[in-house]
Amino acid sequence: MPINAPSLANLSLVEFGGRLRELKDSGVNFFHIDLMDSHYVPALCLPPRTVRDVKTLCPDAVAEVHLMVDDPTAYLDELRDNGADWVSFHLDSTRFVRRTLAAIRERGMRAGVALNPSQPVELLRPVLPWLDYVVFMSVEPGFSGQRFLDGSMERLAALCRLRSDSGLPFQIVLDGGVDYPVARQAAALGVDVLVTGIYMMFAQPDGIPGAVRRFNAEFPQ
Ligand code: DX5
Ligand code: ZN
């Protein structure tokens, strides 16, 4: 069953601590932390310091950082020092994908590559032996609340086929516009982590505790 990974970029600073506590108290122990530099994508959020704040409140949780930045290597020391567990960067954000993956692993973190909707899944094949996970984007990166793009489920299925063909044990994180119909199909395909945002965690009628209960009922851990 896939892990619930709430996307913290959905939260305003005003509500950040309270909502994080609610997620923790509901049993969530995996957080997706978007880091945007206003160059790779137009938006600017969240600071690397967010990782420290999350780990302070939830020391046992996994902090999964999704870098949407022009120079991923420049962030790695700070992310390690703040307690990041998983770090991914976009395939087209560096000319040195292998070296960047190695730099993440050398710092004791799990290394991932993020793939945009416009990029063929086959682009990943050469780098698969060097990574721990793939962040499969089903929206253009840059902001929360977009709709799951047409054709993404077929592309996701192609990635799952590539995984079984390669025999490599990397994990798959699905990010962008994930709602329940999407989540069910993705779970059936074997996706490991669902990034849950506005549709599954932050705009549910019974608030965060109800949203987490619903997730756990659909996907018993
Ligand atoms: C988009 C981000 C996502 C986003 C997901 O650039 O990478 O993590 O916050 O949240 P929803 O599903 O609400 O768009
Ligand atoms: Zn993300």
Image: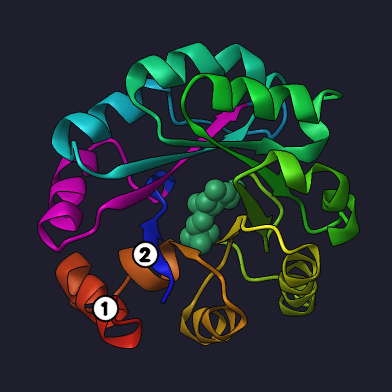
Q: Residue at x 37, y 56 (%)?
A: 6
From mark 1 to mark 2, how far is it between C-alphas?
9 Å
Q: Looking at the image, is 128 positioned above or below residue 47?
A: below
Instruction: Name the image quarter holding residue 220.
Output: bottom left
Q: Secondary structure at mark 2?
A: strand
- The residue under label 1 is 216
- The residue under label 2 is 4
Query: Is residue 143 at all visible to an observer of this figure?
Result: no
Give x and y (percent) for residue 27.
17, 61
Mark 1 nearby-residue class (10 Å; few <14, some 14–19, many ≥20) = some
Of mark 1 and mark 2, the one earlier in the sequence is 2
131 left or right, relative to 36? right
Q: Nearer the viewer, residue 101 or 79?
A: 101
Q: Residue at x 62, y 81 (%)?
A: 189
Please name the amino acid that badge 2 sits on: Asn
Give x and y (percent) for residue 216.
26, 78
